[in-house]
Image (cartoon, rainbow, N blue to C red):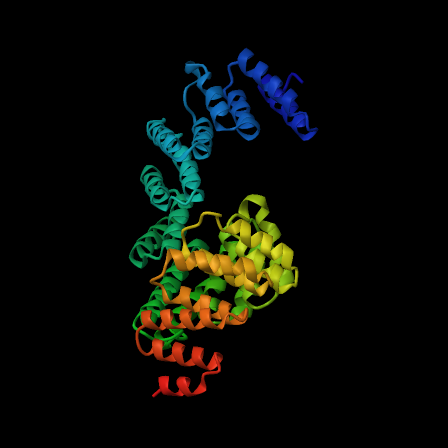
Amino acid sequence: SPDVPEAQLSLLRADVLVRKGESAAARQLLEEAAQAGSDASLWIALATHVLRTEGPDKARQTLERLPKNLGDSPALLVTWAQIAAALPAEEGAALLADVETRAGVLPEDQAPQALASLAQLRLASGDADAGERMLRAVTKLLPDDIRSRESLLELLAGRGDVAKVKAAAADVIAVAGPSDARSRAAEATVRIMEARASLQARRQQGEEAPGPNAKELRLLDEARNLLIEAENDRPGWSLVQTLFAEVEGLKNNIPAAIERLQKAVAIGPAPPAVVRRLVALLYATNRLDEAQQAMQALGADGKEGMERINAEIELRAGRLDQAVALAERSVSGDSKDPADLLWLGQLLDRSGKTDRAGTVFAEAVELAPQRADVWLAMFSHSLAVGRRDAAEQALDKAAALMPEPQRQLALGQGLEMLSRIDAAEKSFD
């Protein structure tokens, strides 16, 4: 068509070939179009295709052939960053640092877009410090941009720094205006953070699982009222539903929190963290079918790290072989983390794989002989499989490592389980 640029036609044809499963033909088409034309989008599409089908080294070599006169652009630098993320850690870090430097010297109308995209890639990879740094750079370049300020506020809220959250919320309000729905949500975020911080402080002082006190309830009620106003203005905003869920969760109203998270997912698109939170709450309340259904929203990539909860769901549903397979896959064969091994051993025990569980518990004991919880797990396992002598030895080891009064309680209960009633009674004296 004379109205469609040739580069765009090539991209469309390549997309059709990929959808038909003709990956090699798509690569050849993009290669020929990139070599013949002067459009960087063709090189970007080619490198992206190569990254997906042949890996980061080949993709890097592809972009290194890009004609120098085409220069940098936000889209090109994001593609470089995607390649860097797929390379080995040290090599990828060096390339990513170079990409970020190049983004910082783009023209003023391009640098913010590039930095914002790179920030999201950093956050997706788990590097919150770099993500925060780049989002702050964007806010400086764009003093009236609300989106970068909202992203920064969301990031800081996830990191739990109340002082930084207050400052970021004030920045959102200054740009959006005090009566804007985004400002209401920002204010609600501050109230939620203050209530959570107060609850956590009381737990750290020794209070066991306290519910919200009068001050915290007031903060949560204020947050809820702000969110009602925001919802009235923007009923299709999933963030409001997520914040409602935070309020209900802090009030220990789990069914209401689940309902709000389900609304957030239904509105879409929900961040993976929101879906993961929904799955965790559904699992904790034994709503297994709903948990598995919600997990489908994560897709293959988003399910990374969810193998354990999926294994627990399969176990509760009676699908033991699937549960064991997921559990084994979630823990590295050479794991040096005793907590990983404890969880795996306990799931194996519950799945009836007692021999394998014993091996895993033995590995945990060898790794962390100074941890009482490791010995208690070995005690429970040994007792369950009829190895009484090993159980008594494990109980003694655990008790020797525990402070009072935990030692007295664990020893007494363990002796009762061993049917040593007289010894159990003496341990409580």
For the point 41% across and 15% down, the residue is: 68
- Where residue 195 sits in the image (x, y, percent)? 37, 67
Q: Nearer the viewer, residue 427 or 12?
A: 427
- Where residue 315 sits in the image (x, y, percent)? 61, 62
Residue 178 is at least partly visible in this image? no
Outermost residue toward the right in this view: 20
Considering only vertical position in the picture, is 325 above or below 318?
above
- Where residue 408 sits in the image (x, y, percent)? 35, 80
Quadrant for residue 348, please give it. Answer: bottom right
Considering only vertical position in the picture, is 421 above or below 2?
below
Residue 87 is at least partly visible in this image? yes
Outermost residue toward the top in this view: 36
- Where residue 286 sits in the image (x, y, percent)? 59, 67
Considering only vertical position in the picture, is 142 above or below 180?
above
Q: Nearer the viewer, residue 250 or 358?
A: 358
Considering only vertical position in the picture, is 299 above or below 228?
above
